[in-house]
Amino acid sequence: MPAAGCAEYSRVDGRLFMELKGKKIIVLVEDRYQILELWYPLIRMREAGARVVTVGPEKGRTYRSERGMEVTADEAAAGIDVGDCDAVIVPGGYSPDLMRRHPPMVRLVREAHARGKVVATICHAGWMLASADIIRGRRVTSFFSMKDDMIHAGAEWVDEPVVRDGTIITSRMPDDLPAFCREIIAAILE
């Protein structure tokens, strides 16, 4: 039996700690990301046993948050086959505005959705859903200033901490990260 605190199957919130073992999750990266919205889900998914791959416009490039924290892309979006992943997480900040300027990044989100993968966005990351044209007729949330963007993309916008409509999961802001991550894990396990 492993030492206390290191047990592979420790109980956390009534679930098994390594509940996502064998799952692959893509986290999209680009400059000007919101620190907590990238790192909290990335660490939480790794903690749950998932293999987390950071994907940006360029493989090996280092991207900086709004405050200068760095993350390096493991892979380039152009070379990704979403068929072997279980979820795509898009952090907020101003990075989604830069992400959507790269067609391979938008294609990745669109294809993940088309293949029934979980697509999870928080805060301003709704821009990627709008650019991928996958929220028409869907119920979503986002940071309040994104409300009009979501409505103009054809979505029904609501002000709730986390909203799930099929395989699309949306959330508003860093305060909602615990609920956001719980919903992502639940959706992947279904």
Image (cartoon, grey):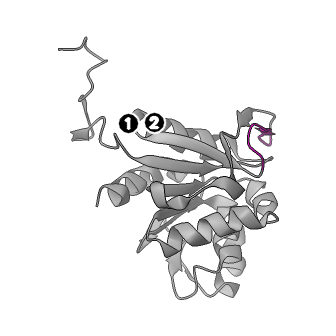
Residue under pointer 1: 49
Instruction: Please state which of residues 80 and 127 is positioned toward the viewer in this rendering.
Output: 80
Q: Are marks 1 and 2 in contact (CB under 8 Å)?
A: yes
Residue range of the region highlighted in magenta in the rendering: 58-66
Q: Is residue 94 left or right of residue 128?
A: right
- The percent position of residue 9, horizontal first and vertical second, equals 23, 30
Residue under pointer 2: 46
Q: Name the quadrant containing residue 99.
A: bottom right
Residue at 73%, 59% (x, y): give it: 96
Q: Which quadrant of the rendered structure holds the C terminus?
A: bottom left
Task: Determine if residue 143 is in view.
Answer: no
- The percent position of residue 152, horizontal first and vertical second, equals 70, 86
Q: What distance separates the C-alpha of mark 1 from that of mark 2?
A: 5 Å
Identify residue type, mark 1: Gly
Q: Which quadrant of the rendered structure holds the N terminus?
A: top left
- The percent position of residue 159, horizontal first and vertical second, equals 54, 71
Residue at 71%, 78% (x, y): give it: 149
In magenta stretch: residue 71: no
- For residue 106, above or below residue 2: below
Callout 2 environment at 10 Å: few (<14), some (14 to 19), or many (20+)?
some
Say what secondary structure mark 1 lies in.
loop
Residue at 67%, 54% (x, y): give it: 79
- For residue 147, above or below residue 188: below
Q: Is residue 181 left or right of residue 105?
A: left
